[in-house]
Image: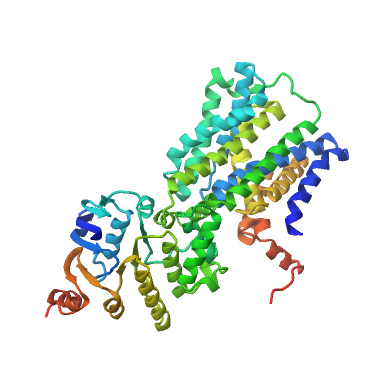
Amino acid sequence: MSLLQVKDVSKFFGGLAAVSGVSFDVNENEILGIIGPNGAGKTTLFNVINGFYKPSKGDIIMNGKSIAGRKPHEICKAGMARTFQIVRPLRRLSVFDNVLASAFLRAKNKADAEKIATEVLKFTDLYEDRETLSKGLPLGKRKRLEIARALATRPKLLLLDESFAGLNPAELDKSIEIIRNIKKSGITVMIIEHHMKVIMSISDRIVVLTYGQKIAEGTPDEIRHNQQVIEAYLGEA
Amino acid sequence: MKKFYPLITLAVLLVLPLLGFSTYVMHIFILLLMWATIGMSWNLLSGYCGQVSFGHAAFFGIGAYTAGILYSKAGASPWLGLPLSVLVVGVFAFIIGLIVLRLRGPFFALATLASGEVFRVSAENMEWLTNGTLGIMLQKRLWVSKEPYYYIILVIAVATFLLMKYLIGSKLGYFFVAIREDQDAADSLGINTTLYKTIALVVSGMITGVAGAFYMNYMGYIDPHIVFALHDVSIITIMIVMVGGVATQWGPFVGAVIMVMLQEAVRSIGSLGALHQAIFGLLLIFIIIFLPNGIVGDFGKIKRFFGLGRVRA
């Protein structure tokens, strides 16, 4: 059973087709990688799925219901959370309050929200930093805070936009471990990533975009040997 | 010790009128509490929720005119304007919100500024309802002495303080701050930003409206230039919170003390004339550069400057 179906989705900005006619399914409890060269329309696709943009064409179905054109907060309530490529923590709040603010979505009261926030912070290994103002965190932890904040909304599907970019090797390992644990806890993950080694090792399946179009879909092995993908990345021979 | 501060402050405020101050001093205290109330309400919308309003005069004026019109047209006690203004200003704030809350940042600020002016011009021209520029005057104020007014505005101020304390500590408070820090991120985290911004605006407007209705009762005279004034209401409100401390609990009180005193001091120097506006402007520039979080928010900084605070290791 697929959790999310993207059906022939297009997004035009004026005459530019940032995403055109993209279709794929996200299966329950898998990690789906989205890759593609710069400007391929990956983040635009996320923005359409998560509700920041209304799709110009096509439909997005989550759990059997269309969510195309719904507001981001409604889609989040339906069980989808996301992180941002350029991290957007609530700068003047502590790490704990950042997570608490989003934990209120599912919590019955403040004590409940605090419990969720504590749980999530421990899960993402940020509990030691809970008192720090989020603008003072190093990039690696800020990226993790993004994930923690999204997790606090108790999503079924998590959209990660380049959560590995700019991390050092130690932080990278930490984040990979966290994402594997997220999958283990039963959450489906969709992830945009440029870091090939990471995406090949953690994804169950991969979708490749170029110039707004899907050119390939398959297991990491299939993608690695796909002629079109190699051309898209290395140029035609 | 720190948690007793509110109780100590309350005790001092309760016994103040018993100390035999002159009516002029009591008048200052009343104004001070009224401005602190308006400051707290502005702080909710603009300090915590980040939607900087330049048009709180609209709510102040509508509140004042609710009480005034109730008296002049319906012959009812203007005191009924206090509860009624909550309703009337609430409705107006909701309608204003439908328009201005679609805008962000400076555009929101300009739209609120314009809405304040729209109400001023309307009040000037709808003479059948508002008596136009003649204004509304109460034949007789209920009390001659200041004490009853003082206690009424004290109750309003304390109630507002408690309401703010409750709201900021609750789910709403966290949502407001999340919207202030990053509206798009807040939206993607499941916060209905339009709904919560509307709540902040309506609650903020209602409280300012009650203060306006009180003003009508206390001063006994209003006209559009007084209660819908851009610089004397909207801007002063902003200054009170900026000087005292944006998004702090005590900021509006501290700011109100300083601004009301300053206003009175400047007024007593007759030769200054309109120069007092310039003094306020300079003060604001000073605060923004050196104490961007206001006196309460940057208290540690002030203590360090005077060499009082302990240096943290």
**Residue B24: where, in percent of width, then height?**
81, 36
Q: Nearer the viewer, residue A206 or B312?
A: A206
Q: Nearer the viewer, residue B178 or A150?
A: A150
From this view, report whether residue B213 is shown above or below residue A156: above
**Residue A181: where, in percent of width, then height?**
38, 73
Q: Residue pushed farthest bottom?
A: A169
In the picture, measured across the screen, residue A125 lies left or right of residue A177, that is right
Q: Residue at the spot x=20%, y=56% of the render?
A: A9
Give the image quarter of residue B273: top right
In the picture, measured across the screen, residue B48 lies left or right of residue B283, that is left
Q: Nearer the viewer, residue A202 or A49?
A: A202
The total number of labels drawn is 0
| Residue B21 visible here | no
From this view, report whether residue A159 is shown above or below residue B178: below
| Coloring applied to the structure | rainbow
**Residue B162: where, in percent of width, then height?**
66, 45
In the picture, measured across the screen, residue B238 lies left or right of residue A23, that is right
Q: Residue at the spot x=39%, y=80% of the render?
A: A173
In the picture, measured across the screen, residue A112 lies left or right of residue B150, that is left
Q: Residue at the spot x=74%, y=40% of the render?
A: B267
**Residue A29: where, in percent of width, then height?**
30, 66
Quarter of the figure that contains the C terminus of chain B: bottom right
From this view, report whether residue A218 is shown above or below residue A60: below
| Residue A120 visible here | yes
Quarter of the figure that contains the N terminus of chain B: bottom right
